[in-house]
Image (cartoon, coloured by chain):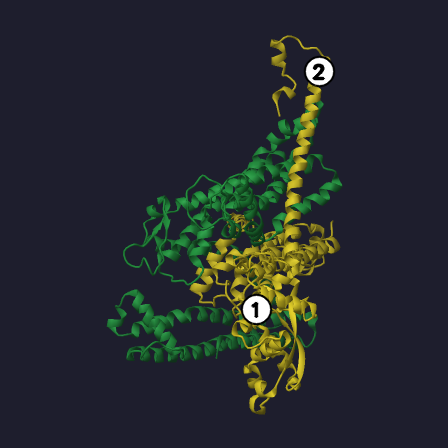
Chain colours: A yellow, B green
Amino acid sequence: MTDSALPMTVADSATSAPRKLVLDKKRVRSRYAAERRFRAYGIAAIAFGLFFLAWLFVTLILQGYGALQQSKMRLDVTLDAATVAPGGQVDDNALRTADYTALLRTALRTTLGVGSDRGERRDAYALLSNGADTELRNRVLADPSLIGKTVSVWVSAAADVDTLIKGQISRDLPENQRRLNDRQIAWTDKLVADGRLEKRFNTALFVNGASSDPEQAGMGVAIIGSLYMMLVVLLTALPVGVAAAVYLEEFAPRNRWTDLIEVNINNLAAVPSIVFGLLGLAIFLNFFGMPRSAPVVGGLVLALMTLPVVIIATRASIKAVPPSIREAALGVGASKMQVITHHVVPLALPGILTGTIIGMARALGETAPLLLIGMVAFVVATPATPFDPATALPVQIYMWAGASERAFVERTSAAILILLVFLIVMNAAAVVLRRRFERRW
Amino acid sequence: MSSTLVLAALLLMMLASFAVGRQRALATADGHARTLHSRPPYYGTYVAMWAAVPALLLLALWVIAQPTVIDMVVRNSLPDDVRTLSSDKLSLVLTTIDNLANGRAVVGEPPAYAKEAAARLLSLRATSSWAMTVLVIGLAAVGFFFAWRKVNPALRARNDVERAAVWLLIACSAIAILTTVGIVFSMLFETLHFFSMVPPQDFFFGTVWDPRFTAVGRDGSAGQFGLIPLLWGTIFISLISMLVAVPIGLLSAIYLSEYAHKNVRAWVKPLLEILAGIPTVVYGFFALTTLGPLFRDLGASVGLDISATSALTAGVVMGVMIIPFVSSLSDDIINAVPQSLRDGSYALGATQSETIKRVVFPAALPGIVGSVLLAVSRAIGETMIVVMAAGIAAKMTLNPFDSVTTVTVKIVSQLTGDLEFNSPQTLVAFALGLTLFVVTLGLNIYALHIVRKYREQYD
């Protein structure tokens, strides 16, 4: 810290009065204090990093775990044949278009004992999710024999009810500032007391597509879109990356051209991800006319980003294969290509796969390039092929983070937790692969 | 036939040629594989290669060239008065023709020439598709027979196949180059297009960022595209993030490499590196929902007006993200400082911290500067954190509590939503992207140069 802590130089001691060789206790003490301070700074720096990490995770978990459960309402719905299948027709089309909302509303009215007052009715209906009719419809489509019976179904409650039950909105606010009025809160409490309203596992979060109703919005489309993209990355970046690395490591002469490729690869690894998005937009969408929002384009862009990672990892693990193995194979008459395909690459495979998985994990969390190629889309239907519009996990997080409803905060955190689980699994797989199979010669 | 079907047919032909080639090799050798120059599968691969590779190349070429060629023919066949229309109107006509040809709905009654052109488009497409099928399959057959005839025990099939494989490897490694070339050219092309509408000096030295939206600024006022405010925002946020990341990253690297017990290091280092593995959108969300409001409330309690999306919030969160970059790179560099330097310092009676400050740190300084520069380039190119936490107002302010915006934020905001590709409003994103690319590339090359130069001294 201060210069006084330093032993004086020879020149200094020559000009000043000769110093006693007795230890200056005060100075030693201050030097030791400086030593302790310096260590404390180091510990504080590490503590800050770890604290931030813990804070991040604790916040996300506390905010997000609630979204795993969703408030559902048990209603005794009379599936009267006249509404569900008018004219006795039980074909798919009639079942799809029937007015399930009316059935649910009737059931809700009888449960709550609501009269014919319009305001009262409106308040009661607001307790139901807008997507509840779809849930009932799927139930009926799965089992048409239910028609004509009174069945007890669990359907989603509205997001406002959900946030109330989870305690995320205060009951003490004045009525006109609340999303639910006193009557609705009383009904909610009654339903809870009757065991008709409770939190159940939120399957919709994992299977549904985009929705503007938080209680119906899910990550299904995003998960599938991300899986497609990872598939494209794996199928393109891995073979191309390994081939490029094999060439550079085993065949390439040392000349300007290969130097250029090397410098290039190192620089590509450090190019900002958003630039790859611009590349994808200009080349894949505008020049080749590929579809917007398609996972295949996203996958190609991410593959270009992952390529340098795969090449660098592959080169490192090919380098680690000892020359004696190559020489032995050449000695028994194998050609150079046979040495590589039969010996070098199989021996380097654990390292290659570790690098690929780590690169893919990074690609999975990448958002910015996907925004530019139109993956920010409101996609309801599950994509059947990689050419259909889809979103990706991180893009879904970005979109939900921008939504204003309180219930989306919880869902965004849950989506982040899902993404982090994927990343942790991938990284753990890479670590296991390295520990298990990587040989050290 | 569609190109997918042709591709499938080619793949089938490839499999069949492999089997035929292998059989033929065995047959010419009377079933004695040992009299063959190469192992039988190599002959199969040889024939399959000749059957598939030229045909695949032709197919690829055809698929890429077909739309452009057909488009040109159709365009040239349009009446003269239509062809000389302004480019906007012409593209509208072409869209109408395309919609007619694809059986999509068209606004109003299309003119006769458009119907005619649509019909021509359809017939051209059909012809092209047939020609492609015949030519590609024909080429495959020619290749197959050529190779089939050459198969005999003396043919050096393995050498030929391996030579072709090396070319495949070379092609794969050229993709890395192609990516860079693609990045540079695609952006350069659009940037030049942009500069034909907005003069470069207005872009590089303009101090106002106000890209009006296309609909409003169509005639006359095209909006102002000054780079300076965006650049300032980028630099300002990067500076804040460095103020967080450099001291913390450096101190933790020093502690971990010089003081920490081996077991502590084995646990703490990977934990800190998790910070670099968390997707940036997660940091953005955290900044938006937790840190931003926290800073705002803290500011309010001491009477400071901190906006919820501020340079401070974005910078701090970005700094945390960058800590592991600085710390692991510095860690490597500090470890590369030879032990003899430390031992010499201890022998003179210096304490450990004095040794670090006076000997190890100066020796490692060039490398540390390099790693900091790499971190800076990372901060400049970072997108999601700033998109979510820094705000969108392009301001030149020195107040860290105010919201500023960056180059990357503007690239995203100019390119999401409905796009019209000929307006400066969207093209400016490519100019911004090119600027970003050049700046980060320069930083990276310089930083890697410093790191490498430094390493050579002790190796």
Given the image, on which type of amino acid does mark 2 rest?
Asp
Q: Is residue B400 visible?
A: yes
Give the class, few, some or many, for how many residues have Cα within 10 Å of label 1's Cα (few <14, many ≥20).
many
Q: Which mark is residue A24?
A: 2
Quadrant in the rendering for residue B327: top right
Which SS class for mark 1?
Answer: loop
Residue B110, position as x, y percentages in the image: 31, 78
Q: Are marks 2 and 1 in contact (CB under 8 Å)?
A: no
Please state which of residues A266 and A336 is positioned toward the viewer in this rendering: A266
Residue A76 image offset from top left, x and y in percent: 66, 78
Query: In the image, which is nearer the foreground, mark 2 or mark 1?
Result: 1
Q: Secondary structure under badge 2?
A: loop
Q: Amino acid at mark 1?
A: Gly
Is B100 placed above or below A437 here? below
Q: Residue A234 appears in which quarter of the rendering?
A: bottom right
Q: Which residue is mark 1?
A: A209
- Mark positioned earlier in the residue sequence (2 or 1): 2
Q: Quadrant of the C terminus of chain B?
A: top right
